[in-house]
Amino acid sequence: MGSAHTFRNKTRAVSPRFAYLSPKDRHVLSLGEPRHRFNVIGCGINGQEHIRVTMLEGRATIHGVYDPHAGSIEGARREYAQFGQPDALVVYDSLEAACNDPAVDGLIIATPNYTHLAVLREAVKSGKHILLEKPMATTLPDAYEILRIARHYDAVLQVGLQYRYKPIYVEAIHEALVRRSIGEIKTIAILEHREPFLDKVGQWNKFSEYSGGTLVEKCCHYFDLFNLFAQSRPVSVYAVGSQAVNFLDFTYDGKKADILDNAFVVVTYANGVRANFNLCMFAPMVYEEVILCGTRGRLRAFENEDFLPVPRPRSGLEVLLGQDQPSRIATPCYPELIEITGHNGGTYFEHVNFIERIEGRPTNAATAEDGFWSVVVGVAAEESVKTGQPVQIADLLARHQITDV
């Protein structure tokens, strides 16, 4: 398993300060020999993050990349150059070549959401291990096809729902589901207030047709956490939302942006657990919070980046258990060198667990089934916003002739 100590030494090993050391004189600062070789398909901001984290984690290396956009390839080269010779990075001229190179044993798919199924259909022909970015699909039929592919796939097929590895959620999962500190969970509340969607090549994330809609594209992370904490299947979803502030006058190639920038979502589970989600994407900060209420107590965890110079904790955890047991207040975090790699370190530990799975060790990394159910809730929420009515999950699945989930 990776560790902060290993990560720190790896980071220093690639620093120009230590370039004078020969391989013979490197022990603590040795880069080591990677055991796995991955190709990255899709080299935008997420693909570049995967390159960085793969190289820093150290048990794998990036062999090559594929992306039809020249600017993204240049970004990939810059990331890779921090760790090795830029000329050593293989740049493929086709998706087929990137997927089927016998020199690699793993593929990381970080292409735009609406392309995931088409890319995966080619990738699985290789039989290689696959890390597929979230959301695994933008529509329910596509998500179901991916689930069916995964059920018969012999190698690892992991979905990139890495929020379960953010420090606040790692601790919340441990307290609530392992220690069971707060008893039986009865209600779940998650809040995200943040800045608008950033720019992408082709601006596909501004259009529901390509992204799946905000409640699929962005919020599948939170619906995965809902499903994880509830330990049950969703029964109904009711949501309201609108496009109130962001991209109201934005057009691209003649198309007008149509994504939600705020929403409230309520999910009811088969075991009686209820969950609510509060989204605002026109806030001047990045703030995230989860509150779990159980039969014996209440858990609250948060992370905050408000860009102000006032010193304060960027994360926090409270487990309040009244007068019967000790309560706890903590500051969940990874070393800064891990947190700055992306998603507060969640992507780094997603890769740790990807390699653990490849090497046959159990993890709680997101499976295709987890990815499918996160999309189910997101699709139901988007539909509920449009119709103004609750969506019954059984009816939603039946309309798409999905009966074996």
Image (tube, rainbow, N blue to C red):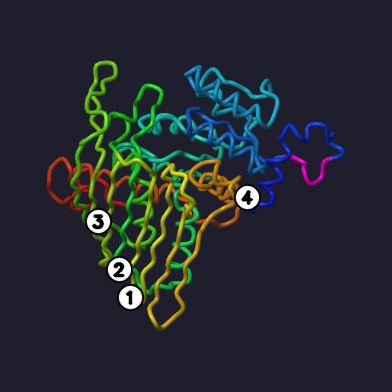
Residue drawn where x is 21% and y is 47% of the image: 396
Report, in whole angstroms, how far the alpha carbon at label 3 lies from the one at label 1. Answer: 19 Å
Which residue reaches farthest right? Answer: 24
Circle 2: element type: strand
Q: How crowded is mark 3: few (under 14 residues within 10 Å), some or many (20 or more)?
A: many
Labels 2 and 1 touching (C-beta < 8 A): yes
Residue at the spot of label 1: 295
Is 265 contained in the magenta span? no
Mark 2 and mark 3 in contact (Cβ < 8 Å)?
no
Residue 318 lies in quadrant: bottom left
Q: Which amino acid does label 1 sit on?
A: Thr
Image position of 377 (left or right of 201): left
Instruction: Give the secondary structure at mark 4.
Output: loop
Residue type for callout 4: Glu
Find the distance from the CA under tag 3 to the CA under tag 2.
12 Å
**Pointer 3 residue:** 267
> Which label number is shown at residue 141?
none
Mark with earlier residue (3, 1): 3
Task: Tell which residue pokes out farthest to the front in this image.
Answer: 310
Q: Which residue carries the number 2 mark?
A: 186
Is residue 311 rendered to the left or right of residue 360? left
Q: Which residue lies furthest to the bottom in this view?
A: 324
Give coordinates of residue 211: x percent, y percent.
Answer: 32, 33
Q: In this view, does 391 lie above or below 318?
A: above
Could you tell me which quadrant the N terminus lies in?
A: bottom right
Q: Which comes before the other along the chain, label 2 or label 4?
A: 2
Under mark 2, the amino acid is: Lys
Residue at which label 4 appears: 359
The magenta stretch is 26-33
